[in-house]
Image (spheres, helix red, strand yellow):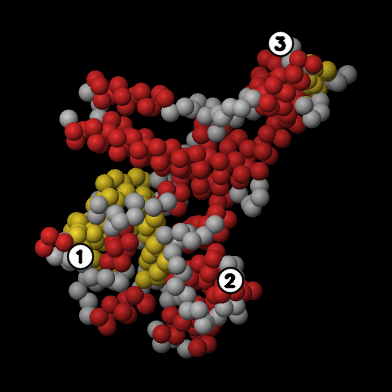
Amino acid sequence: MNTTGDSLMLSASGLIKNYGSGTGLTRAVDGVDLDVVAGESVAVMGPSGCGKSTLLHLLGGLDRPSAGTIKLAGQRVDQLSERSLARLRRDAVGFVFQAFHLMDELTAIENVELPALLAGRSARFARHRAVGLLDQVGLADRAGHLPSALSGGQRQRVAIARALANEPLVVLADEPTGNLDSEATLDVLRLFDELREAGQTLIVVTHDSRIAATADRLITMRDGVFVDETRLTGGTAGKLGVMAGLEG
Amino acid sequence: MQEVVLALLAKEPSHGYQLRARLRQALGPVGEAMNAGQIYVTLTRLEKAGLVESERAAGLPDRPDRKIYALTAAGNQRVADWLAEVEWPGPAPVEFHLKLVAAAASRLADPLSIVDAQRRELLRRLHEAQRAAMAEPDRSEAGLLLEGLVLRLQADLRWLEACERHWAGRRSTT
């Protein structure tokens, strides 16, 4: 898809990621093109092993592609040095993982302020920002708790606050609700929805159609390639009554 | 719809607008598709069928929302029967299934493109239902209904995946 007029936030072209070699060669990502405009929320849905997590890792600079190009806000990022790549992951990308990946020995607020401290911001700035973010995710009263004293849903909300610490260009989430019950899932989805409305560019990969369906655009992935794409917003709406069997 | 209106009346005799308000509360955004006059049309039909009787408040003009409706004995029995029925509402997958079978047999259409089109439609519906569910306050009755819609759409989508596997397999063996 080519977009003109809207500014491209993230753009991947001819993306390939191979594992192994010779007869053991696996193409986890097998020629993917993806354009995401600023402020868009995109879901990539597919069964486990379809390559969606690998794709997310490539997009966020956690892994390097075997071939193809990736541009973030117009800058090539697929050939950066290790050092630049680390800076990119810290400053320009916010990650949210299924298993939260919080630092167990740090409190909620210390987890959230860590990225700003690593980016060289003052302790005072980092704390101020972390307080605001914890408030935004509804956990102002849990700031001093260790992750072990928080529920799964609360831990993921801390992780989301942490992902936002350096005002990333794009938030990348990998099965963000995979470890959560339905109530906590709804909390996380509501939070993502608030981010979307605030204009945050968001890419979520999931096997769960319910999570994927909250995005503006949904891409279906199988065996390393995109096989279908559906724009979910701006189409026909007002079908709740039909779905419930009240009419139609 | 008829049984629903009857069941709402089972609690106590009511005005039509009271029934509408009760339905709106139970259905939330789902009920927005309902025509405002639908309750009155249904009440009139039920009255003709002898399941409901109405009484007009004295001295007021003869408008449907001035009447108080109550169940007749037959209406009461119908509600009891309806509540005892074990039936899961909603469209059966039979029609869609037969459409794929017919498309494949006649070669007039590709079953896989039919499945794709259906999946896109269901995903758009899931999007709408999920966004509506997220907008509901915790523990709302309407939120519970929306949860039901979401879960059913997810089940339908999983069945579409099975359809896709089946018809893709058929295509590769012929």
Residue that carries the numbered disc 1 in the rendered image: A19
Q: Residues within 10 Å of mark 2 (few under 14, many from 20)?
A: some
Tags 2 and 3 on a common chain: no
Residue receiving disc 3: B48
The answer to whether any part of residue A155 appears in the image is: yes
The circle drawn on residue A48 is: none
Helix, strand or loop at label 2? It is: loop
Residue A72 is left or right of residue B30, and the answer is: left
Q: Which residue is mark 2?
A: A150
Chain letter for mark 3, please. Answer: B
Residue A97 image point, x, y percent? 42, 66
Mark 1 and mark 3 residues within 8 Å of each other at the beta carbon = no
The number of discs equals 3
Q: Is residue A195 left or right of residue B166?
A: right
User: How many residues crowd around disc 3 within 10 Å: few (fewer than 14), some, or many (20 or more)?
Assistant: few
Residue name at image x 30 percent, y 21 percent? B102
| Circle 1 SS class | strand
**Residue A177 at x, y percent in the picture:** 47, 59
